[in-house]
Amino acid sequence: MIRGLLSVLGLQLLVAGFVTLAFVLASGPMAAKSAAVGGAIAFIPGAFYAWRLIVSRDSAPSRLLRAHFVAEAGKLTLTFVLFAATFLWMKDVSAIPLFVAYIAVLLVYWLALILFKIG
């Protein structure tokens, strides 16, 4: 389980870096900064979720189910807070690179689930 989670997180970082690089080459540093933030908004809550599962992996089934609920609630809360903070405090954010990177990083997780049946 841990190896699968860490592999997905590593692939997410790789995709975030690739998308950021693509935007810096195609559109410049502002777009790249927005893409990097979008990738981070997808990665950080996912890493939190993975950490919560790793910490509670040896728990009883009822506690493990509770850990999943807490992890998912934390993931959603972190996502909301990170988007809110980005749009409130970040100057010159470009929405298209931000959301392209966000979606690309999220797709890594879903494609891994489909292709490798991780989980």
Image: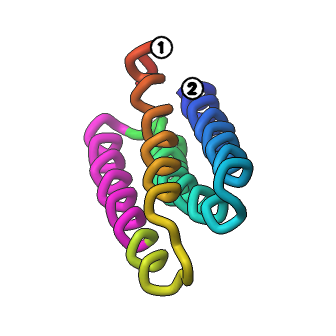
Tell me the number on the disc at residue 116.
1
10 Å crowding of disc 2: few (<14), some (14-19), many (20+)? some
Residue 16, by quadrant, is: top right
Residue 21 image offset from top left, x and y in percent = 72, 47
User: Does 7 sit left or right of 47 as displayed?
Assistant: right
Q: Where is residue 104 in the image (x, y as percent from the top left)?
A: 49, 40
| Most foreground residue, 17 or 70 | 17
Please name the residue that numbered disc 2 is placed on. Answer: 4
Camera sees residue 52:
no
Which residue is depicted at the point 55% across and 78% down? 92
Quadrant occupied by the C terminus = top left
Horizontal side of 114 relative to 69 (left or right) equals right
Nearer the observer: mark 1 or 2; the answer is 1
Front-lying residue, 29 or 2: 29
- Work out whether residue 72 or residue 53 is closer to the camera in this orientation and state it: 72
3 is higher (above) or lower (below) than 78: above
Which amino acid lies under the numbered mark 2 shown in the image of this protein?
Gly
Q: In the displayed structure, does residue 60 sit left or right of residue 90?
A: left
SS majority, magenta: helix
- Residue 42 appearing in the image: yes
Which stretch is magenta?
Answer: 60-81
Q: Quadrant of residue 81?
A: bottom left
**Residue at image x 32%, y 56%?**
70
Tell me the residue at 70%/60% (across/down).
Answer: 28
Q: Which mark, residue 100?
A: none
In the displayed structure, would residue 105 be above or below residue 27? above
Q: Which amino acid does label 1 sit on?
A: Phe
Toward the viewer: 75 or 39? 39
Residue 84 x/y as whole percent? 39, 76
Residues under numbered marks 1 and 2 in contact, where contact means CB atoms less than 8 Å apart: yes
